[in-house]
Amino acid sequence: MTSDTRKTDVENYYSEVLTSSDDLQTTACCTEDSLPNYLRTTVSQIHPEVLSRFYGCGSPIPLNLSGATVLDLGCGTGRDCFTVSKLVGPTGRVIGVDMTEEQLSVARKHQEFHQNLWGFSQPNTDFRSGVIEDLKSVDLADNSVDVVISNCVINLSSDKEKVFSEIFRVLKPGGELYFSDVFSDRRIPEQLQKDKVMVGECLGGAMYTEDFRRMLFKMGIADYRVISTSKIDLKNEAIEAQAGNINFYSITIRAFKLDIEDRCEDYGQIALYKGTIPEAPNQFVLDDHHTFETGRPMAVCSNTAAMVRDTRYKDHFEIIGDESQHFGLFDCAPIQSSSGNDQTSESVGSCC
């Protein structure tokens, strides 16, 4: 399938076939993670028209966004953009990129509504028409963005390597990619990749987890972390029959633009979370097997240390030790699944 054909099919599906989330034939694009309490009230205030055309599969909104420049890839009608616009505040900025004009028109129509809702003197959202494979076309410069988010969109691209290359081009050193998307436990057959409904429902372009890992490694991203994983129940007999034995998962992932190693190495370092992020006074969750309790020292590998020391989280952590003495590999493996046959967060993700 050519990139132009995929682009046309996706654009038609999200502008003509889908008029609201009720038109979806499966649960793949609406299997949201439970929203954290501090976001629940904010999201409930978003304009109803924006919410009615939301097709996300997770909650890819990280902590500590005040004053940040955030890029939302495939922003649609802007639900996540408007949520983040409150979190970044009047000194921050949110840029939404989407190729579907029908979606962008809804987002732009409600910019002033959300500006007034959050009490800002001027809008801090900027919606741009373009494709996520070419962010230069929407005037996004190298090293210009603090955080990139995306919610169930990258699977729709026919050239995912270009997408991730662009993401890490525009991220600042130490910047963060935090996204939710649909993944699969095996490569999707070509006939399903060409099926307009399977693609539109976020299944035909699902990323095989191991191919995703290899692609990031090729780009120099040696360690990424899984935040959460949930198996998708398609709830559509015809589509289930097409999918056969393929298992699909909604996975939320974070990766940093950092020079880190491809294995978790032990340098005897300790990390301590200060509890100073307002939305997380008691604990900070880095990934599915690193939860930092406030004030409680935790032994960490050098990669984990870098993720909280050399990023925008640095003021909220104390790191004891450096990389002057090496003690071998660090054992920070997640707890293994007891089922032994389900694709869970324990079997995909970071190097450790």
Image: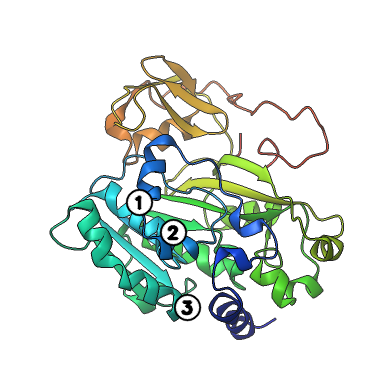
Q: Residue at x 56, y 75 (%)?
A: 14
x then y, percent, for residue 40: 41, 42
Q: Amino acid at mark 3?
A: Thr
Is residue 121 rendered to the left or right of residue 176? left
- The tag earlier along the polypeptide, 2 or 3, is 3
Residue toward you, 117 or 226: 117
Mark sitting on residue 168 = 2
Q: Amino acid at mark 1?
A: Gln
Residue toward you, 188 or 248: 248
- The tag earlier along the polypeptide, 1 or 3, is 1
Question: Label 3 near label 2: C-beta < 8 Å?
Answer: no
Residue toward you, 11 or 49: 49
Tell me if I can see residue 67 in this picture. Answer: yes
Q: Amino acid at mark 2?
A: Phe
Q: Residues within 10 Å of mark 2 (few under 14, many from 20)?
A: many
Nearer the camera: disc 2 or disc 1: 1
Q: Residues within 10 Å of mark 1 (few under 14, many from 20)?
A: some
Marks 1/3: CA–CA distance: 24 Å
Nearer the camera: disc 2 or disc 3: 3
Residue corresponding to mark 3: 100
Quadrant of the image containing the N terminus: bottom right
Callout 2 secondary element: helix
Q: Residue at x 61, y 47 (%)?
A: 251
Quadrant of the image containing the C terminus: top right
x then y, percent, for residue 72: 41, 61
x then y, percent, for residue 23: 62, 68
Mark sitting on residue 305 = none
Q: Residue at x 52, y 24 (%)?
A: 266
Is residue 303 rendered to the left or right of residue 143? right
Marks 2/3: CA–CA distance: 23 Å
Mark sitting on residue 45 = 1
Callout 1 secondary element: loop
